[in-house]
């Protein structure tokens, strides 16, 4: 069955929308009376490796689906819609009675969402904002969900769009904003942060061993001429790192670029605010999952879930429990789930991915 004219026009208008439209919310729609079987591009029981309808293969997709186990009629929140790879797979499982809420701060993701909206049977909604703010908004609305998941970091779409300046591999303006309407860019940060603040960011967010030397070099070089492009920054980093350290540990600018991206987009602050909000939105029995790409993210997801999975916190020498604390969560796996060698071979960007998931057993004991 085809879309109504209104639905088709809405989907086409979304595809045509200029990238920097600042509207915080895109679409809220319910379709009725249409199962996934009859739709173009819909493949029930889809093998993940067979494609997603989103034009790229999402990381740990099969594993994520197995942990989330989406059921017809459920409500799912994709906190990091990106290219919509995971969302397409989840939406297929939710069916026409289900609801998918997608969040992303990137207008490119908003454009990709139009494709999913046009193809899926379930009720869909897109919120363009940081996921911390979007989840706070959903909480204020009183939403309850069965599934919430994060696929953290930047999307392939972002890193492959040269002019966004996310990659040390291409010459581009130093930008790195996931939301191009945001004020702070990597260029500003490099131009304005003092040496100490730069060094702390490079060390804490990039785990860069040469953070002090790189910060010092940046400050020295920017006094001579502004550092405005990715390759100017790569040169500055190269000149700060001792020659032996430039070989063998991946690209010498990798850690600094990671640190800058995390700082520009306040990625850890967003995650710290978002995890409790996502958890609070889940019904009992609901599942929270997070795919991380570096230890700073993974540690947060792990700690968040472990704290909720902990029961009694009485001192061990007490003969009986007096705290009365019951675990709120069950970890679906004790260890993180990592991609198979076959996935890494097919998609090297999956190499450092770690998936963790937990089921909500009950609301927090007061
Ligand atoms: C790794 S990609 C997600 C890919 C997606 N799962 C897929 O299968 O196509 C991460 C996405 O999350 C978005 N993102 C990262 N941090 C965000 C935040 N704090 N708020 C909203 N979106 C965020 C990025 O803009 C990016 O599009």
Image (tube, helix red, strand yellow):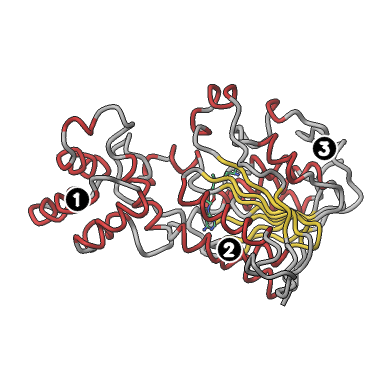
Between the C-alphas of marks 1 and 2, the distance is 33 Å
Of label 1 and label 2, which has the lower sequence position? 1
Residue identified by numbered label 3:
39
Q: Quadrant of the C terminus?
A: bottom right
Between the C-alphas of marks 3 and 1, the distance is 50 Å
Vertical comparison of 256 with 328: above or below? above
Q: Quadrant of the N terminus?
A: top right
Query: Which of the numbered marks, if any, corresponds to residue 227?
Result: 1
* Dot 1 and dot 2 residues touching (CB under 8 Å): no
| Residue 177 image offset from top left, x and y in percent | 41, 54
Q: Residue at x 63, y 52 (%)?
A: 13
Of label 3 and label 1, which has the lower sequence position? 3
Residue at the bottom extreme, as displayed? 366
Q: Residues within 10 Å of mark 1 (few under 14, many from 20)?
A: many
Residue at the right extreme, as displayed? 33
Residue identified by numbered label 2:
274
- Residue at mark 2: C-beta within 8 A of ligand 1: yes
Quarter of the image for residue 232 reads: top left
Vertical comparison of 97 with 278: above or below? above
Q: Secondary structure beneath disc 2?
A: helix
Q: Nearer the viewer, residue 285 or 27?
A: 285
Of label 2 and label 3, which has the lower sequence position? 3
For residue 208, side relative to residue 57 (left or right): left
Q: Residue at x 23, y 32 (%)?
A: 246
- Residue at mark 1: C-beta within 8 A of ligand 1: no
Q: Nearer the viewer, residue 47 or 178?
A: 47
Vertical comparison of 327 with 38: above or below? below
């Amino acid at each position: 069955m085809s879309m109504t004219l209104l639905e088709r026009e809405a989907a086409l208008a979304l595809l045509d929308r200029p990238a920097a439209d600042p509207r915080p919310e895109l679409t809220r729609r319910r379709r009725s009376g249409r199962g996934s079987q009859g739709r173009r591009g819909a493949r029930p029981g889809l093998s993940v490796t067979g494609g997603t309808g989103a034009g790229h293969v999402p990381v740990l997709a099969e594993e994520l689906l197995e942990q989330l186990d989406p059921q017809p009629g459920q409500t799912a929140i994709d906190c990091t819609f990106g290219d919509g790879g995971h969302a397409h797979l989840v939406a297929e499982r939710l069916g026409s009675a289900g609801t998918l809420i997608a969040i992303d701060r990137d207008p490119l993701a908003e454009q990709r969402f139009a494709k999913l909206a046009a193809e899926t049977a379930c009720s869909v909604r897109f919120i363009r904002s940081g996921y911390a703010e979007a989840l706070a908004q959903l909480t204020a609305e009183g939403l309850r969900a069965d599934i919430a998941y994060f696929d953290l970091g930047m999307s392939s779409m972002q890193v492959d769009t040269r002019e966004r300046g996310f990659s040390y591999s291409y010459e581009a303006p130093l930008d790195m904003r996931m939301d191009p309407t945001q004020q702070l860019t990597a260029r500003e940060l490099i131009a304005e942060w003092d040496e100490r603040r730069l060094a702390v960011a490079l060390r804490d967010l990039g785990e860069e061993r040469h953070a002090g030397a790189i910060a010092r070099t940046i400050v020295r070089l920017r006094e001579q001429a502004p550092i405005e492009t990715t390759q100017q920054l790569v040169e500055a980093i190269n000149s700060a790192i001792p020659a032996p350290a430039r070989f063998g540990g991946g690209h010498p600018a990798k850690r600094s670029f990671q640190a800058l991206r995390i700082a520009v987009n306040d990625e850890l602050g967003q995650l710290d605010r978002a995890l409790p909000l996502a958890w609070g939105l889940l019904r009992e029995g609901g599942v929270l999952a997070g795919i991380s790409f570096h230890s700073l993210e993974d540690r947060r997801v792990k700690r968040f879930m472990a704290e909720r999975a902990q029961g009694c916190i009485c001192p061990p020498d007490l003969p009986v429990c007096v705290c009365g604390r019951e675990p709120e969560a069950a970890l679906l796996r004790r260890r993180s789930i990592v991609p198979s060698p076959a996935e890494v071979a097919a998609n090297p960007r999956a190499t450092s991915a770690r998936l963790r998931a937990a089921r909500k057993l009950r609301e927090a004991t007061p």
